[in-house]
Amino acid sequence: MRHHQKFFSLMQGSGRLLNRFLAVADTQGDPHGAIRKGNEWVLRARLADARFFWEEDRKKALRDHTTGLARVTFHEKLGSYARKIERMLPLAGAVLPAFERAGLAVDRAAVQEAVRLSKADLTTQMVKEFPELEGIVGGLYARADGLGERVAAAIAGHYLPRGADDPLPATPEAAVVSLADRIDTQAGIFLLGIVPTGSRDPYGVRRSVLGVCRIFIGMKVRVLLGDLVERAIRTYGEAGIEGSVRPADARSSLLEFYRGRLQHLGESDGLRPDSVRSALAASMDDPYDARLRMAALDDIRAEPGFEALALAHKRIKNILQDQVVTLPDPALLKEDAERALDRSVRSVLPAIEAAQARLDHAGALREIARLGDPLGRFFEEVLVMAEDRRLRDNRLAILRSIGSLFLRVGDFSEITLQRETVAPARASGAATRPPESRR
């Protein structure tokens, strides 16, 4: 009614659907009721068709409709929907523990059953006539078969979100099925070397990737995205399906595409583009954590010590560029300033780790900012590029350890500052001290 006839359905205040509708006509009136009767006649015929399809489809259980999936092509080079279901099952099993770790109760049996039946309605007469009802019909038929509300809701909701403004799946089971479906499709398309462009995205991968990001972020689920993508790509190989590009290339290309969608999400939420880039440059493997770090970087920029903090990290990165760095050796700390810096790092490290354990990335940055004075003294008093190779390597190792603290939140080389005064590492003599970071 809504999709084909463009009518408005009416509901009671309780949300129950009424057997009434509204239609809009570009005319001044309908004195004889011809327009109303004509719309009623058209709708009555469509509903009669739907009733016929329902009765025909219901002559067998939803499970029995899955037998036809072997004859429904998912993609000519990726096989049928029956084969897609086989790939989705282990992928759903890989995604599910992340939801459990997030404290979401997930019915494992319901997830497996929903995956097996998720595409069954593609073989029904109802969906063949009304393809926009895919998933919804499967959920209705599952509910009529008495398969349980969790299974029915997972089938009905696994296509969500269909667009940028759509709601997320209503249940964890539906979200798991949705993720398995989407990531399998994405892996297959990228294995074929089909990378979406600004003007061409025939398989809706851009919308699919955005949906995956929204689910993980919106449901506060932490994952290792690279592992899931690799698992999905490997599943194709295990099924004997070869792509047009190397699996490693497909993986890197798909993850880079995710980076672009995460950048888009962050900017769409009003965050500064360089804050978003900084968080993603440090790590984008966990979309939920990356989104939190974007916000932390954006929030802390208003604090007095942020610019000094950013400049310090930029300087460290410049010094470490093209350097092979080992682990620091406390026995090689000769100068008071480097020993003081080492003590400061050891002092703030537990607080940084505690802040990040509770996902307080802004708090972690404030702890890192406490290194501003000892780091400034280090640059002023210590010759980093000493002639003694052991001392030089050890001092570079100290800087790398500090740089790694910054990278737990973001890569500050991506941050655009009003004044860029990063000094190069000195070869001898005194170094120019960077602006101090004040708490």
Image (tube, rainbow, N blue to C red):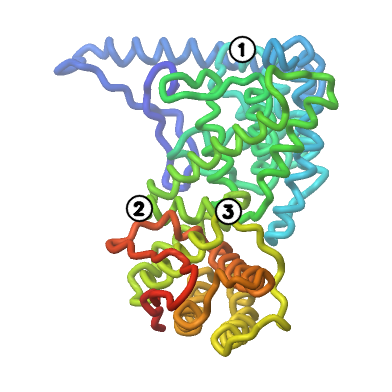
Q: Position of residue 51 (x, y in %)?
A: 60, 16
Q: Amino acid at mark 3?
A: Asp
Identify the image quadrant of the C terminus: bottom left
Mark 2, mark 1: which one is toward the viewer? 2
Could you say which quadrant of the image residue 84 lies in?
A: top right
Q: Are marks 2 and 3 in contact (CB under 8 Å)?
A: no
**Distance between mark 2 and mark 1 Cα atoms:** 41 Å
Q: Amino acid at mark 2?
A: Gly
> Mark 2 or mark 3, which has the lower sequence index?
2
Identify the residue shown where x is 54% and y is 13%: 48
For residue 87, side relative to residue 217 (left or right): right
Q: Which residue is mark 2?
A: 270
Q: Position of residue 71 (x, y in %)?
A: 76, 9
Q: Is residue 96 visible?
A: yes
Nearest the viewer among 145 and 178 is 178
Q: Which residue is mark 1?
A: 128
Mark 3 closeness class: few <14, some 14–19, many ≥20 residues within 10 Å: few
**Distance between mark 2 and mark 3 Cα atoms:** 35 Å
Circle 3 SS class: loop
Could you say which quadrant of the image residue 302 lies in?
A: bottom left
Q: Which residue is mark 3?
A: 322
Q: Amino acid at mark 1?
A: Lys
Could you say which quadrant of the image residue 130 lies in?
A: top right
Q: Position of residue 379 (x, y in %)?
A: 47, 77
Mark 2, mark 3: which one is toward the viewer? 3
> Mark 3 or mark 1, which has the lower sequence index?
1
Q: Is residue 405 above or below residue 17?
A: below
Identify the image quadrant of the N terminus: top left
